[in-house]
């Protein structure tokens, strides 16, 4: 299962985000906790099983 | 078609559909090479009120491989931006567009050209470059040829660029070919058994969106030197075009969209008809996503093309020798995937090495001819396809004949091609469309006002 999640950068996180622009996170592999995080043309892959599970749970 | 709507996914995304790629030594400026990629297949000229344009959300690339590894060494990247002067009118233009900066033109496009090297270093060659409008009609776009000429921009350092609507230069009898491989001049021999007739150019009058850039030859060679020796590997480049979109698209409830993520390739084109005719349906979308360096996985379809097995069935008793030919088609592998080595065609080679890669291979040391033959190398004209591709080259006839076995003796002299192999054609020639003698070489697009809807063939 994969999940698209749109995480609008919270105001508190704006300074650490990508210039306050919307961020899209795509869970590529929920089992490995592999998440593509995209803003503009920038894309990084993080591994965070806890975050992946939390987003997936939100759809239930 | 060369690559118009050639794969299931890209057929639904015309703005990103790379329909043709051309690469040739500029006939009127032989110190340069012209690289052309076309998009937006089969534009009926009467396309208002939203006339055709490039995608602001698409990255268009022209790639050049000069070391034979199937990967880009020089890339020309094109990014577009649409500017609407007055969003409160539905009109494309509010009066005659008599110049490229006319205030009557409501919806314009501008673009940025960036050169990338093999290490990804970027150099902006030009920005804020205006596209011409589409050819609407004599009331809206009078003197269209002159108007479009204003959109030819010099980038300095011997480079020239154009991006905008052109008349389709690729001629093909689509209606017949996709009706069970029918070639109208040979219909009597086809299983349909109808009387022979003349070819019908399915692209007649249609427009296309062209990206053309003319650059000095030395900008494209591995050594950085001007190529003068046709037998030198430094003289040969491999060219292909591509279009990419960002990985994610978010649709907002207000009708706006936003794209996120890295660029993902969704269309490419090197040799005409490769993805269209060689690659099977189930792998066409995959092929569009790959670079030529990955083309080894399609080798079997080049060695044993499906069309070669169909011709003897569709034209009974016409291709007996082709029907017996079961060997891997090393001739097609050379033409399409590696280039022709020295010693096959006298005074010619366009070999890029052993990497199997679908690229349009151009030997830049071979100059243009004043007496071109649209059949290119098989017609004795070394300046034409498959030595690159000129806008008027008859690639349909060349590839039909090659697949029918005409070129197999290049690698196996014991094979005798069937007599029909050297005659195959869909019945069309370069005279079925028009071209320009100077950059950007593709002809002036037909206006909507001057176009009649499609008719019926008798």
Image: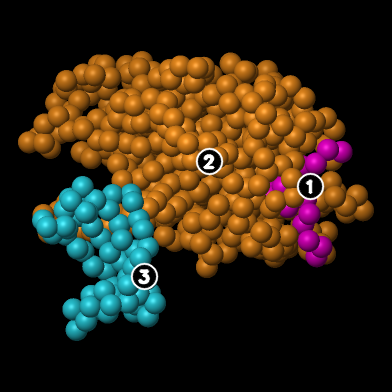
Chain colours: A cyan, B orange
In this figure, which residue is indicated by the disc labeled 1? Answer: B407
Q: Which region of the structure is painted magenta?
A: B326-343
CB under 8 Å between discs 2 and 3: no
Give the distance between the C-alpha atoms of the residues marked 2 and 3, in whole angstroms: 28 Å
| Quadrant in which residue B167 is drawn | top left
Residue A25 horizontal side relative to residue B70, left or right? left
Q: Chain of mark 1?
A: B
For the view shown, which residue lies furthest in the bottom direction? A60
Residue B194, x across and y down, in percent: 61, 56
**Which circle marks residue B119 in the picture?**
2
Tell me the SS state at disc 3: strand
Image side of residue B91 versus residue B330, left or right: left
Residue B439 against residue A57 in the figure, above or below: above
Let me know if residue B81 appears in the view.
Answer: yes
Taking the spot 73% from the left edge, 60% from the top edge, the residue there is B303
- Which disc number belongs to residue B41? none
The answer to whether any part of residue B200 appears in the image is no
Q: CA distance from mark 2 to mark 1?
A: 38 Å
Question: Which chain does tag 2 point to?
Answer: B
Q: Is residue B280 magenta?
A: no
Q: Which residue is mark 3?
A: A47
The x, y position of residue B118, in whole percent, is: 55, 40
Q: CA distance from mark 1 to mark 3?
A: 53 Å
**Numbered disc 2: secondary structure:** loop
Residue at position x 30%, y 26% in the image: B128
- The residue at the point 64 percent across, 61 percent down is B298
Residue B270 point in image, percent of width and height: 58, 45
- Image check: B139 left or right of B371? left
At x 73% / y 52%, what residue is drawn?
Answer: B333
Q: Quadrant of residue B304?
A: bottom right
């Amino acid at each position: 299962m994969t999940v698209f999640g749109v995480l609008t950068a919270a105001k508190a996180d704006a300074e650490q985000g990508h210039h306050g622009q919307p961020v899209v996170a795509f869970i590529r592999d929920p089992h490995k906790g592999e998440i593509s995080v995209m803003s503009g043309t920038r894309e990084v892959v993080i591994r965070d099983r806890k975050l992946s599970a939390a987003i997936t749970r939100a759809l239930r | 078609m060369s690559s118009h709507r050639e794969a299931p996914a890209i057929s639904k995304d015309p703005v990103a559909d790379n329909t043709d790629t051309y690469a040739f030594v500029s006939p009127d400026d032989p110190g340069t090479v012209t690289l052309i990629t076309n998009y937006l297949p089969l534009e009926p000229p009467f396309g208002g009120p939203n006339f055709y344009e490039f995608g602001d959300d698409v990255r268009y690339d022209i790639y050049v491989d000069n070391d034979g590894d199937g990967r880009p060494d020089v890339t020309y990247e094109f990014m577009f931006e649409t500017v609407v002067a007055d969003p409160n009118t539905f009109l494309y233009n509010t009066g005659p567009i008599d110049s490229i900066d006319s205030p009557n033109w409501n919806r314009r496009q501008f673009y940025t050209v960036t050169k990338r090297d093999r290490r990804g270093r970027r150099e902006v060659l030009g920005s804020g470059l205006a596209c011409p409008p589409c050819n609407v009609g004599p009331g809206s776009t009078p003197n269209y040829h002159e108007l479009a000429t204003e959109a030819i921009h010099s980038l300095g350092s011997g480079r020239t660029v154009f991006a905008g609507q052109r008349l389709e230069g690729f001629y093909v009898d689509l209606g017949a070919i996709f009706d069970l491989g029918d070639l109208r001049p040979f219909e009597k021999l086809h299983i349909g058994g109808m009387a022979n007739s003349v070819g019908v150019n399915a692209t007649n009058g249609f427009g296309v969106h062209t990206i053309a850039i003319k650059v000095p030859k030395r900008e494209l060679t591995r050594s950085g030197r001007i190529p003068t020796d046709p037998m030198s590997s430094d003289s040969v480049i491999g060219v292909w075009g591509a279009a990419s979109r960002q990985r994610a698209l978010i649709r907002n409830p207000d009708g706006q969209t936003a794209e996120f993520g890295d660029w993902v390739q969704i269309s490419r084109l090197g040799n005409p008809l490769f993805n269209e005719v060689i690659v099977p349906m189930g792998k066409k979308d995959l092929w569009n996503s790959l670079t030529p360096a990955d083309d080894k996985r399609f080798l079997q379809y080049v060695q044993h093309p499906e069309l070669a097995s169909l011709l003897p069935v569709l034209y009974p008793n016409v291709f007996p020798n082709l029907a017996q030919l079961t060997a891997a088609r090393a001739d097609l592998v050379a033409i399409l995937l590696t280039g022709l080595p020295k010693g096959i065609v006298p005074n010619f080679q366009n070999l890029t090495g052993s990497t199997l890669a679908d690229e349009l291979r151009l030997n830049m040391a071979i100059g243009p001819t004043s007496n071109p033959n649209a059949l290119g190398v098989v017609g004795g004209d070394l300046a034409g396809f498959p030595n690159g591709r000129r806008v008027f080259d008859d690639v349909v006839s060349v590839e039909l004949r090659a697949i029918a076995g005409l070129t197999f003796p290049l690698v196996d002299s014991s094979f005798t091609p069937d007599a029909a192999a050297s005659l195959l054609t869909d019945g069309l020639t370069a005279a079925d469309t028009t071209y320009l003698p100077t950059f950007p070489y593709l002809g002036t697009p037909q206006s909507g006002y001057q176009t009649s809807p499609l008719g019926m063939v008798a």
